[in-house]
Image (cartoon, coloured by chain):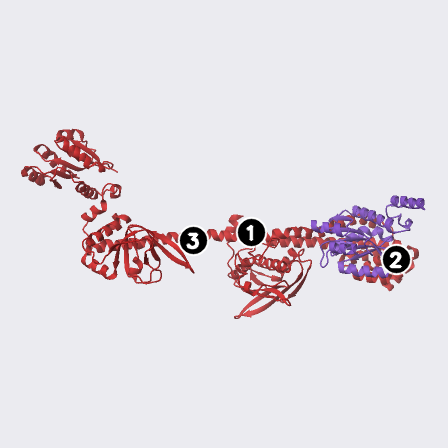
Chain colours: A purple, B red
Amino acid sequence: MNKYVLLCVDDEREVLDSVLADLDTLGDLFDIEAAQSVEEARELLTEMQQNQQQLALILCDHMMPGTQGVDFLVELNQDKTHKAAKKLLLTGQAGLDATVEAVNHGGLDFYIAKPWQGDELVAHVQELLTDFILENEPDLMRYARGLDAEKIFSAIHARRQSL
Amino acid sequence: MRHYAIVCIHSDANLLLNMQLSLSSLASHFHILLFRDVQQASTHLTKDQPIAMLISELSLQTQVFLVAQTQLHSPPKCLVYNPNDPALLINLINQGRVDQVLTADQVNLETVKRQLSQFLQQKDEMLAHYADVLDTTQLKSASIPLQGQFLDYSLYSDSELSNLVINALYKVFSNNDEHHVCRRYSKNHLLTREGEHNNALWFIADGEVQLKKHIAAGQEQEVTIMRAGSMVGGMSFITGEPAFTTSITLTGTEVIKLEKSQFATLMKSNSELLGPFTHLLLRNFNRRLQSSIITKLKLQSTLQSLDAAHAQLVETEKMAVLGQLVAGIAHELNNPVAAILRGADTLKLKVPSLVSQEISANLRQLGAATLNNAMKITPLSTAITRQKTKAAIPLFGSNALARKAVQMQLDSPEQFAQHFAPLGSELAATIQQLDTYYLVGNFLRSIDVCAKRIADLVKGLKHYAGQDIEQAVFSDLHEGLEETLVIFENRLKSYQVIKEYGELPQVQCHPIELQQIWTNLIANAIDATQGEGEIKLHSYTISKQQKDFVCISIEDNGIGIPEDKKARIFELNYTTKREGNFGLGIGLTVCQQIVKRHHGEIKVISNNEEQSHFTRFEVYLPVINPDIKQRSRAENEQEA
């Protein structure tokens, strides 16, 4: 079991499978979890807390039955436990209002429009995860392979200097 | 038109000059030719110049000329000044003809006019042409005896005929108006009142009378305005039926008012009036009939263009709804498109490695089975996958490997024991290899599913935007409902759509028109619930008056419709819609019209109490329905 979790939420199973396939390479460093609705995602978060796992990044669709993506991001951002997690919207249809809401109150870190390019998605996710690790994880070395190695090594170097 | 001459011959130049002055009003229609003697006249008159009238002194010199002229094939009227010698006159009478002997020096214009009219009438000339200068009606009435026999009144124009009758009536009453038949009304005098009995007949000699008719409570509309020469009250007077219109004077008006008893007396004592009066009456009614036929024809063509406009409006409403859905539909398309693109990308990446992998025959077999399986079977839900993954972690060691095994459905302890336990350190690599087979199978399936979804959506749109064929067809109503739901799928994401479909027979209908009903009702349900809630679709069969009907009901748990507004919702210009809602606000009217054309019924059941609020539309349609009128196709095509 990995310490950090990468969570993907999309009501469309085919889209969700595509995202999971794209992010598969990160599966060694992070537990990759998938949920088909915000409600399911909430249950998952509770379970993670019980397992002492922490949410590192959420990649979320907006237009979904029940709670919508942006509202969920706002909810996470107001929750101390998940505030640190990187937040991505992967959507074809968040209107301007919803997007502004996500930026202002949801702590939105990135917006990817559907349809997306697989390598770009992975690159952005890696970038955000690198930032998350640098901000939250004392043991950086483990993540150098798989994330932005250069950034991580220079951070390791900087930390040693400051000691 | 020939230009006739009036030839005047007199030795007295002053008299000729006076004559010219007297006749000057006729100069526009006749050549007035003045001669001092016969010789002068003979020289100047050519054979081509037709002569309508000779006005001449009668002397030895003129006598021969006048005799000759009056013996021609079409002799002119001959007016002569009284000669002092009676022999001259007798001679002319016997040898030729004299129409009038003038006694005074001054020529009487009225006499000249009357004689000219007679001449023209005998010549079958168009009297109307001379109407400006000759008082033709008066002269005709003098020339045609007003007897009971049938006369050719077609010679008279409308105004001539009515003037004839009115003038004759004035003449009758001029000395003898004891009943005050000739009277003058001031403005706003009421003649007849619509729906009430009327005992009088009015001839309007001067002024204006307005006829008007009730069209709605407290509202009257002008029918026409009657002016001088018209008759008011004729129809109700003759038939005894209540007056058809209310008539009221608009200005000071001169009338001849005849009550029934006066009318009878008048016709008895002046029987010569019966002919022209009957004709006037018939002419009057004929004109009204003609004008009402013309009005009807005009109305028909207006109705036709209104029909066309209406058909266009309905089409516009349909497309307006579609327009509001388009953004959502584009998004709706975006998801499967994204999945297909990603799937194709992943396949490009994975398939070559699949082909080049060097693996054992056993593993290849297992891989092929996994691929096949993934292609056919809908993947487990994420929740179940997670649950099973948790259970499998102890066997597979890591979350990632366990999840992959679960996805491939190779995670049971038996399968682990069979396929994976012997592998030892090779486990991770093998699962990774098998996962490639799984991914390829799953993406092939996913591309297929997504492409079908796009195809369905496109089909639904094409169908909705299209036109029915002329004949009613037997159709599965559930299919139309489902197609409509596909178009709305994006908007319905935050709704619970509950379907309680019964067994329905195929229904004879215009399926695309019906789709417009479902679209409007679902759009209304979405508007009423403001973005989230519950929509129930219910279908069943029902018997009404021994006929089989199907009922489709669409219910939402929105705010409901207040009791006082329920009756009005089908009205054309009734809408509670605000911007951002669907359509033009005529959706329900359109629904009702389509249902009516299908000989069906649409009902609304609604409750707006706080505890239980809902709106349910029930649409009843006969199963067998061979004779359905269609929205004017011709116009729709024209417009296309």
Q: Which mark is residue B316?
A: 1
Three-letter code, disc 2: Met
Return the disc, 3 or 1, that comes first in the chain's sequence.
Answer: 3
Q: CA distance from mark 2 to mark 3?
A: 82 Å
What's the chain of the residue with tag 3?
A: B
Chain ID of residue with mark 1? B
Disc 2 element: loop
Marks 2, 3: nearer the viewer: 2
Horizontal relation, residue B531 to residue B343: left or right: left
Dot label at residue B300:
3
Please state, as top left, top right, bottom left or bottom right, where the N terminus of chain B lies in the image. top left
Nearer to me, A48 or B380: A48
Residue B603 position (above or below residue A86): below
Q: Which residue has dot 2 on it?
A: A1
Q: Position of residue B241 (x, y in %)?
A: 32, 62
Query: Looking at the picture, how far across and down is residue B410, in whole percent?
Result: 84, 60
* Chain of the residue displaying label 2: A
Q: CA distance from mark 3 to mark 1?
A: 24 Å
Camera-nearest residue between A103 and B332:
A103
From this view, report whether residue B555 is shown above or below residue B173. Answer: below
Report if residue A49 is visible in the image.
yes
For the residues labelled 2 and 1, the Cα–Cα distance comes to: 59 Å
Q: Position of residue B638 (x, y in %)?
A: 51, 48
Three-letter amino acid code at disc 1?
Answer: Thr
The image quadrant of residue B112 is top left
Give the residue at x 77% y 46%.
Answer: A117
Residue B124 screen position, x and y as percent: 22, 43
Disc number placed over residue A52 in the picture, else none: none
Disc 2 packing (10 Å; few <14; some 14–19; many ≥20)? some
Based on the displayed image, in which of its 4 quarters is residue B501 positioned?
bottom right
